[in-house]
Image (cartoon, helix red, strand yellow):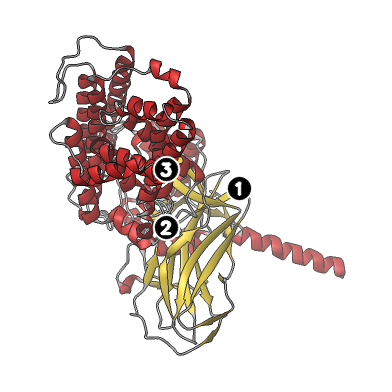
Amino acid sequence: MRKSSILVFLFFLASFSQVFGQIFTPTTWKSPVADKKEVNVGDEITLTFEAKIIDKWYLYSSDFDPDLGPMVTSFTFKANDSYELVGGITPVNPNKKYDDLWEGDITYFKKTGLFTQKVKVLSKNFKIQGTIVGQACSDIDGQCVPFEKDFSFSGLKVTGEDMAPVKKTEVKSVIESTVTDVEGEQEEGLLGFMLTAFLFGLTAIFTPCVFPMIPLTVSFFTKQKGGLGKALLYGFFIVLIYTLVGGILVPFTKDPGIANLISTHWLPNTIFFVVFIIFALSFFGLFEITLPSSVVNKMDRQSDRGGLFGIFFMALTLTLVSFSCTGPIVGSILIESIQGGSIKPVLGMAAFGLAFALPFTIFAAFPKLMDTMPKSGGWLNSVKVVLGFVELAFAFKFLSTIDLVLHWNLLDKDVMLSIWIATGSFLGLYLLGKIRLPHDYQPVEQIGVFRMLLALGVFTFVVYMIPGLFGAPVNVLSGILPPQTHHNFDMNKVVRDNIKTYGISAANASEGIGETVKYGELFELPHGLEGYFEYEQALEASKREGKPIFIDFTGHGCANCRRMEDLVWKNPEVLKRLQNDYIVLALYVDDRTELPESAWITAEYDGKVKTTIGQINQYIQFTKYNGNAQPYYIITDETGSLFTENGKEVLLPRGYDTSISGFVEFLDKGKQLYQNK
């Protein structure tokens, strides 16, 4: 009897897994936890959200640009009078990598994902509710599973009188890629920024305002008793002064909202654009940016006092006197650093100051090295001009942000590349002595080896950018250039759009869709294919044309969906079959376009109302076809039913598999089953 019971149980379990085996969630979210158990009204708490991720899967974080493609994790909080959000959701130490497919940096979690949110308690009846929406993907087969998880928290002992209610609006805490708290920022990114600032500091040494002062300053210390110690102290004060300059910006970068404003709002980006243009024109010699002479003279007089104060004011005088050359460089570092977290300005300026102070301390310690220094000359002005071209190129990065935010569509990717190609070409010609600017008093009669190599590097980069004008990826400039969707002359898209007319099997291709495609303004099929994006409309087309339906459950953030399209769909044999033999239906499960209330669906399995295109499509995949991963390909008849034989499916759904022959066989079998039914 016992054995029979066990067999019955195992049979039931096996049957259950046959039906629901494809419905799984690779992430498990714990209830949010607060850092305090007892608080007063008006206190702030930090909620921690923890997700457990199964092995060989990863969860996308919340702090990269959602326009890249992958579905970022987002938190929606239902507003009520008992709390107020402070800042936004912050991911805790996510991994970061450059993704070749999306052409940008993405952040993600393995095994465990942590997010924190600061909250201000406004009432004794404290309660928080909301929803987490995101996507997890497999390292093995590339399948991606979107999820939606409700959460609630009320486990606090609150004392005190209720505060004034906050405005009841639904707050969505999605942190853009440009907003990065230093706690979640990757170490390698910060080190890269510090290295860049350090190199800028070294470059500033070779400017007309600084280089001639090195022998004068070093000789002053070497002639004094204890000169080496004083020179080291002098270098320390230089680093300290620049670090303090960076520290001034710290209060403006602690709040993620301010960082987001600086990164994305048109006004600060307009200011940055103008400032960079002014810096570039100054380096080109149109004018000089200098501090009032009265300030410089006053600091110089203070340096005569001697002792620690005298050395400090000597260092301060150097920073002021060299401002016309270092000011634009320092300004560039500060503008970049203020968008990246509270400690970034301090570390960036400390790295700059360290490099700037190095020659003064090294030559004071080893005076004989002074004999190896090159003589001052026209090459110092060339350094300024090169920096001017760099400032000019980066100025358009901020103008591009304005263009994207205000939807001007004037500074698209190909336009930006054209500007950079032209700027780089002019820089290369300048290095070769073909262009002269106001402060270049002598023509370049002979090109040195270093100058030649620098010109060669510049022209190499120019040539590298040129294919990008026609749609090729320019990975080095990812994150600086506008996204690929903002490209006016993308040859890949031109080819795809003309496949029906000039491409494979054009003569035998279908005449096209003779009706308005629902959601056609939102989505587009690859490789010139025509199809549908709404389930019921595709069923009607199948009945009308007598063709089976090829359903592609896909997503904007599904990397392997794009790989399947690029590696498999574009194959002539596959594309021919999709064009001629099928009604193609692409259902995006992660699209967040809100639908009118008449199209909403209440799901039986979770009781939630599905209000977006993505939620409706996910509901269809879940309830009709027992799946929730992408890519997910199925073939159905005109009623949306799978092909069965004796109650058993004879054509199983297909996931991520780049076998072209296997995909062709899948399509041929689907067509045959439809014709034989």
Name the residue that disc number 3 marks.
307
Q: Where is residue 448 shown, x and y percent of the image? A: 29, 12
In this rendered view, identify the residue nearer to me: 381 or 143: 381
Which is more N-terminal, label 2 or label 3? 3
Residue 56 got which mark? 1
Q: Where is residue 451 shown, x and y percent of the image? A: 30, 17
Q: Where is residue 223 shown, x and y percent of the image? A: 41, 26
The secondary structure type at the circle numbered 1 is loop
Q: Residue drawn at (52%, 37%), measured in percent from left and top?
A: 662
Which is more N-terminal, label 2 or label 1? 1
Give the left or right position of residue 419, taking residue 650 as reference: left
For label 1, the crowd category at 10 Å Cα-Cα, with few meaning under 14, some 14 to 19 and many 20 or more, is few
188 vs 650: above or below: above
Distance between mark 3 and mark 2 Cα atoms:
70 Å
Quadrant occupied by the N terminus: bottom right
Asked which quadrant contains residue 76, the reply is: bottom left
Q: Where is residue 7 shown, x and y percent of the image? A: 79, 63
Residue 589 got which mark? 2
**Depth-wise, is mark 3 or mark 2 nearer the camera?**
3
Q: Could you tell me if the residues under marks 1 and 2 are in contact, i.e. CB atoms within 8 Å?
A: no
Q: What residue type is labelled 3?
A: Gly
Q: Which amino acid does label 1 sit on?
A: Lys
Asked which quadrant contains residue 619, the reply is: bottom left
